[in-house]
Amino acid sequence: MDKSLLKSLSDKLDGELLMDDLSRALYATDASVYRKLPTAVAYPKNIDDIKALIHFANTHNVGLIPRTAGTSLAGQCVGEGIVVDVSRNFTQILHLDKEKKQVRVQPGVVRDELNQFLKPFGLFFGPNTSTSNRCMIGGMVGNNSSGTTSIQYGVTRDKVVALNCILSDGSEASFAEISKETFDKKKQEDSLEGTIHANLEKELSNKQNRDNIEAEFPKASIHRRNTGYAVDELLKNNLFGEFKEDFNLCKLLSGSEGTLAFTTEITLQVDDLPPPMSAMVATHYSTLEDCLSDVAPVMQHNLHTCEMMDKVILDCTKNNRAQLANRFFVDGDPAGILMLEVRAHTEEELQKQLKGLLDTIEKSGLSYASPVLMGDDINKAIELRKAGLGLLGNMVGDRKAVACIEDTAVALEDLKDFIGEFSQIMKGYNQDAVYYAHAGAGELHLRPILNLKKSEDVVLFRSITTDVAKLTKKYKGSFSGEHGDGIVRAEFIPLMIGEQNYELLKRVKSLFDPNNIFNPGKIVDAYPMDESLRYKVDRKEPEVDTLMDFSDSEGILKAAEKCNGSGDCRKSHHMSGGMCPSFHATKNEKDTTRGRANALREFLTNTEKTNRFDQKELKEVFDLCLSCKACASECPSNVDVATLKAEFLYQYQESNGYPLRGKLFAYNTKLNALGSQLSGLTNAMYDSKLIGGFIKKTSGVAQERSLPKVYRFNFEKHLKQFNLKNTDLSKKKVVLYLDEFTKYLDIEVGKDAIELLCKLGYDVELFYAESGRTYLSKGFLKQAKRLVAKNMEGLRGILDRDIPIVGLEPSAILSFRDEYQRLYEDKPLLEKLASKSFLIEEFLASEIAAGHITSDSFTQEERTVKIHSHCHQKALSNQKVTFDVLNLPKNYKVSIIASGCCGMAGSFGYEKEHYDTSMKVGGLKLFPAVRKTDGDTLISANGTSCRHQIKDGTERDAQHPVSILRQALVV
């Protein structure tokens, strides 16, 4: 399309219209297997913007693809027109009617954030998808989403009371329940809305049409049903049948995937919060057949959850840092697990329900273990199940569990037989499959494992989908239970509901959208399901050489390709976890883990440059990455963007040169060593408004920042002061790693650690070494690699003696487990280093658990302690170790701040162009939490950058945990 036309459209919008290559690439994919490069990406700011986009689409014959979180599995959010993203500006909760229990929202409101708003009123929105912490209400209406709670609370369509929409002619319309009299008035109106009502009456009053719908549509007992347009639902009212309910066009618009109208407001019926008491039974099975056989009998109970996970999903959780802890209830190596939840208002009633359920399970005799989970353990198990979609991205290599037949729903009584025949189809194709999800609703997310880069597997992609569609039709099931038709299943709608019904759907589409501007190629006149795939079929795989070792993912390109688009990184700061701090601040897709992985995949694959990394778009997309590593643990596919960024920076700078500021930060340790020789003078210069200001200006540091002080100290002399007289020969020898930050910037922390360990009786030996963190963060990988080699030789003797190495700065000591593993060739030595390297809190916590350290050594004084943990600790270790060690003083009241990233991230927060983002990140959670505390509260932060950020952002002094413990010592 002529760029001048788009520029003219952009000038008319209050929001944004992006036409650059990066934005188009970022929106070319969703969570499906498809890729379509859009013409442009729009962020409308108001209804007038949407009307302008609709006018432009009609005038220039271009499609509008509505999008919220972009987590669609069937390709609903991709297209060659203008992607219209409402997730940034249409995010308001507009009104709550507590009496009617109805809430009116804009389409960009996140489901879980809506429930956070509703909870104080004793209400919640029931449909609960696995993506609930980032999926948005507009997308849930478009897909008629269901989730784990549908067996109790129904599907989204059941909850939609009213919709405000912009129709294809740009007119506004409001749809809700209307009486026969109101309907008759509507159809007389001289408007598109009037025409729609008049023609729908004509179509649905036709007996032949009604008979066809009844004969061909999925069984009425299947409440997860999204095959085509829900014209069957429009018959269930007093206008066309013997029903009490009034006519409501929202029944049709729900599940229409944005193909009929553009929704701007949604009114939902919400429910009272579920009963507060709950228990979950996790039944384990040796075979899938046994697992599925138990579904019907357990569903005789009043279950709130009946979910299933198979061995493939469970095995994926073993390799995910965040989910590994949530496997606590898994016993042995089950072929499948059912998660069965009961709820009640009293403990007595809960136990009664639980006993009945356990009796049924025992009578069945098919499960080999049935642990009962209570309290927060239930949430952990549910999180494990929810992570299933993303965890499938953990499969190393090009063979992936592919979404094509993953949304089949059949009547509960047909489930076992359906799965039996499905398994035979898979055997016929010599295929393994993945089985998981909503067993209690008759829906399993079944996925074949295919390599869609190969033409033979693309043939299987179509063949398997066709055969399973025919099987679903045989059982009169729904081929699209909750994920929608999109591209992957729309082609099969004529098979599923018959040609006559399909022609009716086409007439409905034409009635609403005669120019086919709303999400074309979805539901009717569908795109082919085996074209426009994410990867070019039978392509020659790009050869991408790297300095770091990415062999664990079969190369850096496949490391990026692990991202399947599930969008976990789009959760906001209102949700738990730290991923992704830059997105929390900007709300831009390019600042998500998904955006960065997609961009890296796109530009490494589609370039003619010798250095594939030499792309300005990649420089832009990695610019706001704080290298916090939250994605390394929280991304279910383990996409580690911090490591990808380090490699990118190295490769890009090899072609474009290393900037002065990058050199200053990379070689910061050498500068600190030099400055420490005359530390008094150096610090005076840093404090000087004139000289310090000049240093900041010339080095590109934000003027608002304070420069860290440098020091010179003899740690060996300090060690001698304590080591000889305090050593307890019954305790361990330990090597204290004094990194570059402790040696020159945080000497008090180093001194406190020596005194603490010695007074607790440990025989302390010191090891000095620059970790290489500054080189890694700025992409100076050759220097980092040389330093790693030097340090590994220095550590070899310590490792040979099997002595634990404890470190103080998380970003330094944890690099031994992380980046060092990619920068050195001696893998056995690296494994030993990883196993013998500990945060000092990890070491102390293990010693407490072994009974070697007790509270007797610490004060009885009462203090309140708030913990902010370093991002690398959260990603590569855990926060509980800090919590445990700070609870050594008996009367310390310790709690962890749910803070996410502090926003400093090493040099990031110093850089003038990143200062505002840095402070905005800190201001989302951490700063308010610190400011709420009184002056006597101790703030614990084990990261040097974190302590600096807290000081700059709140004017409070935070302390390393060892400093707090050293002050609490009474020995």
Image: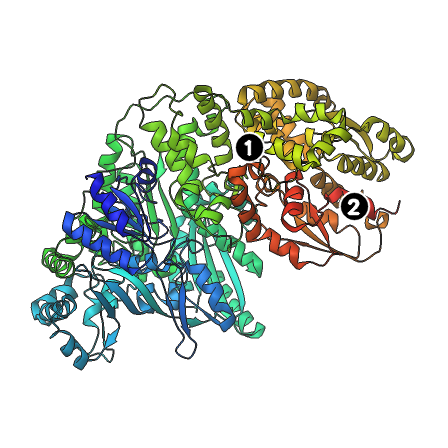
Image quarter for residue 297? Answer: bottom left
How far across and how far down the image is residue 517, in percent? 18, 52
**SS at badge 2:** helix
Query: Which of pointers 1 and 2 lies earlier in the amino acid sequence?
Result: 1
How far across and how far down the image is residue 537, in percent? 25, 30
* Visible residue check, residue 804: no
The structure residue drawn at horizontal position 22% and vertical position 61%, both measured from the top left corner, is 218
Gap between marks 1 and 2, in whole Å? 37 Å
**SS at badge 1:** loop
- The correct choice, above or below, for 272 with respect to 714 in the image is below
Q: Which residue is mark 2?
A: 965
The disc label shown at residue 106, or none:
none
Q: Amino acid at mark 1?
A: Gly
The disc label shown at residue 700, or none:
1
Foreground pick, 492 / 164: 164
- The correct choice, above or below, for 697 with respect to 611 in the image is below
Foreground pick, 198 / 34: 198
Q: Is residue 615 left or right of residue 381?
A: left
Crowdedness near tag 2: few (<14), some (14–19) or many (≥20) residues, C-alpha within 10 Å: many
Q: Amino acid at mark 2?
A: Leu
